[in-house]
Image (cartoon, grey):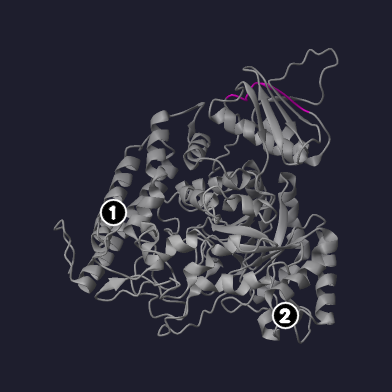
Amino acid sequence: MNGVHPMWLRPGPIPGLAGGDALIEGDDPLLDTVRAEARAAGMHVAEAAASDGALAPQVRISIDRAGTPAGFAVTGDGERTVVVAGGASGALYGWFELVRRAATGRLHEPGTTRHEPTQAVRILDHWDNVDVHPVMGQVERGYAGGSIFFDAGRVRDDLSRVHEYGRLLASIGIDRVAINNVNVHAREARLLTDDLADVARIAAELRPWGIRLHLSVSFASPIVLGGLETSDPLDARVRAWWRETADRVWAAIPDFGGFVVKADSEGQPGPFAYGRDHADGANLLAEAVALHGGLVHWRAFVYNHAQDWRDRTTDRARAAFDHFTPLDGRFADQVIVQVKHGPMDFQVREPVSPVLAAMPRTRVALELQVTQEYTGQQRHAVYLAPMWREVLDFAPFGAGSPPVADLTATGGGIAAVSNVGDDAFWTGHPLAQANLYAFGRLAWDATLDPAAILDEWIALTFWSGASLDREVAAVVHELLDASWQTYESYTAPLGVGFMVTPGTHYGPSVDGYEYSPWGTYHFADRDGIGVDRTVATGTGYAGQYPPPWRETYESLDTVPDELLLFFHHVPYTHRLHSGSTVIQHIYDTHFAGADAVDAMVAAWASLEGRVDDAVFARVRDRLAEQQRSAREWRDQVNTYFLRKSGIPDGRGRAIFA
């Protein structure tokens, strides 16, 4: 780990804990992990309570088997703190709660609080390739170097970073990791067979942190690996092959978590080739994992990626709902249908996917993207927790109805695409570490405030000696707190999305995908802009929502401004609820967004000499690129729409007509 940034868990003594006494009671490998962590934090760890009662530890952790195994209660009296957990994993999570409290000056805070994970399944998906892919590199949509799992076409010999990664994930409550790309290429397919012994080595590094390993698998594995001529899910030979394969995997890795599958999507094989549906395909794998207590995460990202842009009735946004909701109730108990948070593809602004509420008899998981594919690719500082908070809080059936966080908590949980690589800073941009931290915290407790999570991360990350520089903390908080809205303001306006360079998905290209088989996204002409997705005159996508959102999105009078162009095609002179016209809003936000990035650059510059030199330099360089890119976004988007509409900026600012 020499030369690798420790993220939010610094090695060595922890202020508030160092020098104190700790008692961790019980016998379990995870409790051994807790003891080792307490010693590394500088605590004196006793093996058992003194019989004469002489030991009065500052920290005591025990297990009472009440509640869920991952849950715990924390009780402080101002001088000492007791953690009582429902199981060994709860004791581990309880320890890291103490670390957070120590960092924020609340270690022995009086009173009792109960902590239970709101999501039963909390998984990170890595899009890592064993081989370096000729187009996507080693990590598809990864912006932090190569894989921490693989190197030179095989599993790494040195897995010390995987061990440290497990520690980081345990500290935020993640309990599962899928280690390879959902686009399973020929080499990666062999992780399931030839490489099992090496995959088991990765699992061994994650196990001390209570994390179960998963694999992404190809639906065509019986052909690619098994020598069969078919992958038909109803073929008895195919079913037997998967059962035998699952038996071998669990024999090698007894706590193996299960499979992640992308099928019939963007060229990946699937059940459609055999006239079967996705329930048929998912249940094939469910049968194989059932005896082992495993899961099948079956992604709902299925759409036609060979569309004709001339056909305005085709709508990529409709696809997941149209494919999956007719299958509700047919998926086996072991299957979790994994649904992207919006209907398109991780855009900076989308409506919440209607699929999340439309399959009440199916285990449904929310899928987020921690890696910043469409939000600056970790070259831009963009704190995503406020966006995720809006998704989690969205109530599909109206005010007072259960929010998305409750719908997924019933069995599906939350998944996200990881943003970690072998870069010295783990996430490329040091400030992007906040997104990984926030994902874990929200997956654990969906009610947490993003601003409070940000302050936790800052306190843990920017310790200097035995204290936190409050001025540094204030600057970092101000820089990140509104950064999602800043990024949205200088990129695609009012929910249109996809104004990015095709292929790389970085930087502005207003028409880049407009005449593309992947879909069409803004329909800008001389008179107006936006996609008509209404039931009355458009693609009908708005009708996939239950009341009251169906009516809210259908009407120009009630559709939220930030989603206007996702649901409606309107004139440039259409007046928003804010009072501004669409065209003036485009101009104003793009100028304001670029100005906000200038302020971010200046704010970070004020910290020179007050934060770690290497961290300062990396963030400074990334912010300089964000500043350049924000200006390019501003100028290209404003110029495009000035030329398209012929309507000048009402404030007379410079636009390159």
Residue at the far bottom: name it: 229
69 over 247 or under it: above or below: above
| Disc on the earlier residue, 1 or 2 | 2
* Magenta span of residues: 16-24
Where in the figure is residue 429, as x and y percent of width and height? 45, 51
Q: How many residues crowd around disc 1 within 10 Å: few (fewer than 14), some, or many (20 or more)?
A: many
In the image, what residue occupies the spot 23% across and 73% down? 644
In the image, what residue occupies the spot 70% across and 62% down? 361
Residue at the far left: name it: 652
Q: How many numbered markers are drawn?
A: 2
Where in the figure is residue 153, as x and y percent of width and height? 64, 68
Q: Which of the 4 image quadrants contains residue 291? A: bottom right
Where in the figure is residue 499, as x and y percent of width and height? 37, 68
Give the Cα separation between the discs numbered 1 and 2.
49 Å
Camera sees residue 497: no
Identify which residue, 642 or 382, lies in the foreground. 642
- Horizontally, is 600 left or right of 373 in the view? left
The residue wearing badge 1 is 594
279 over 418 or under it: above or below: below
The residue wearing badge 2 is 224
Identify which residue, 62 or 470, lies in the foreground. 62
Check residue 111 for magenta coloring: no
Identify which residue, 592 or 175, lies in the foreground. 592
Q: Secondary structure at mark 1?
A: helix
